[in-house]
Amino acid sequence: MFALLDDYDVQETRRIAKEEGKAEGKAEGIAEGKAEGIAEGKAVGIAEGAVQKGIEDAVSLIKELHVTLTKAMEILKLDSKYRDQVIIELQRQNIEFVE
């Protein structure tokens, strides 16, 4: 039985375990990072889609119901920071509007 212990290298066993632990930790970190990145990307995409939809809806209100730009944004609760984007889209479509 003691002969088996003579062949057992504690330092080598620790080194191997440490390497395995690092590899496992790195793999878990990469997987978690990818999952977080995907979730964050989806959230940004959804938010950007909602903003684009709001801009399109504002243009439609102005075009079809002839409401003012301010009123369209108020009805849609569209943040004023998107006002310029609505104006650009109105101009792109050659739609006359009142602010």
Image (cartoon, rainbow, N blue to C red):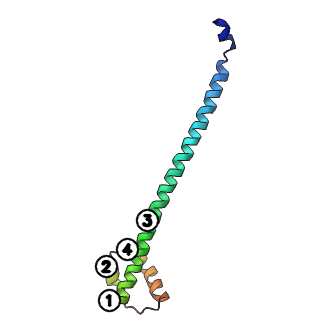
First in sequence: mark 2 or mark 4? 2
| Farthest-out residue, top | 2
Tags 2 and 4 in contact by the CB under 8 Å rule?
no
Residue 74: numbered disc: 2
- In this rendering, is residue 49 above or below 55? above
Q: Do the residues under discs 4 and 3 have CB atoms within 8 angstroms?
A: no
Foreground mark, 1 or 2, reads 1
Question: Which quadrant would residue 86 be assigned to in this image?
Answer: bottom left
The tag on residue 65 is 1
Disc with the residue nearer the chain's start (3 vs 2)? 3
Which amino acid does the dot numbered 1 rest on? Leu
Question: How far separated are the C-alphas under marks 1 and 3?
Answer: 27 Å
Disc 1: CA contacts within 10 A as few (<14), some (14-19) or many (>=20): few
Q: Is residue 28 left or right of residue 3?
A: left
Residue 99 visible to an observer of this rendering: no
- The one nearer the camera, 67 or 56, is 56
Residue lying at 46% horizontally and 80% vertically, measured from the top left: 85
Residue 14: x %, y % from top left: 62, 24
Find disc 3 in the rendering and name its residue. Answer: 46
Label 2 SS: helix
Q: CA gap, disc 3 to disc 2?
A: 21 Å
| Label 4: which secondary element | loop
Q: Read off the residue under disc 4.
A: 79
In this view, the mark in front (4 or 3): 3
Q: Amino acid at mark 3?
A: Ile
How far is disc 2 from disc 4 in space, using C-alphas? 8 Å
Q: Secondary structure at mark 1?
A: helix
Q: CA distance from mark 1 to mark 2?
A: 14 Å
